[in-house]
Image (cartoon, grey):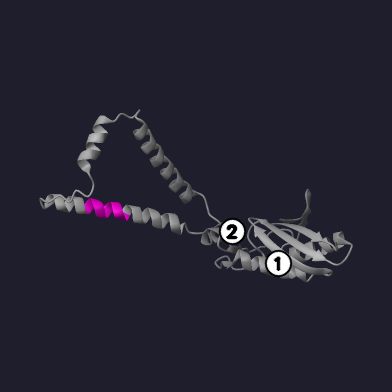
Amino acid sequence: MTTAETGPGSTRPFPEPGGHVTEPAAPARPRAAVRAFRPRRAIPSAISALALLAAGILTALETISALAGRPARLVPYDRVAEWAATTTWQDRQALTSAGITAVLGLLLLMFALVAGRPRLVALRTGDPDLVAGVRPRTMARILGAAASGADGVRRARTKIRGRQVVVKATTDLRDTAGVEERVLTAVEDEIGRLAPIGRYTVRAHVRGPS
């Protein structure tokens, strides 16, 4: 059941498509839809791939040149081996190197496990094998247009922050509470029509004449 919020501590349920507060009888598979629109970690993946590629090329060059009897020595192995033989684990340089390596490894693990900001909002469909999606910016514009069409609203802007829809509207009327209720209802109905997968809350702020 989706909830809408008009202010701090104020929430209420509103119906899903078809006027029911229960889930549709044949929704798209939510987990599969969310996975389909999960953002790819393109930049971290590219950096890791380039680093591994460089290490592989360097290793191949050193190995082939050594087998040919003319070592390239692009990496000063002698100095590295001498440093490793004369340095203890308690040495500051060794601890710093180990710490940097551990932090980089943890960052890569975090990038792999933690989902990033979604590129698309997954929408329900009547076909369990069909997944639909809309960009968050486009969805915000759609909801903003719905809020702007509410009676008494002069202008409205909408932002989507995670699972929260924030609407900022202005009105020429003194009764901002009534306008806020109409804005909330309009945005609720539009969310119900779009039928996004997941629970969204709506927060409306209406500013009256100064």
Type of the residue with mark 2: Pro
Q: What element carries label 1?
A: helix
Local crowd size for mark 1, using a 10 Å CA cut-off: few (<14), some (14–19), many (≥20): many
Res 124 seen here: no
Question: Picture quarter containing residue 34?
Answer: bottom right
Question: According to the image, label 1 marks what residue?
Answer: 143
Q: Residue, x 51% and y 49% (percent of image)?
A: 114
Question: According to the image, label 2 marks what residue?
Answer: 30
- The circle on residue 78 is none
Query: Does 191 appear in magenta?
Result: no
Total number of numbered discs in the rendering: 2
Judged left or right of residue 110, residue 14 is right
**Position above or below: 100 against 4:** above
Highlighted magenta segment, given as a residue range? 53-60
Q: Residue, x 17% and y 51% (percent of image)?
A: 72
Judged left or right of residue 46, residue 166 is right
Classify the position of the N terminus by image quarter: bottom right
The image position of residue 192, as x and y in percent, is 71, 65
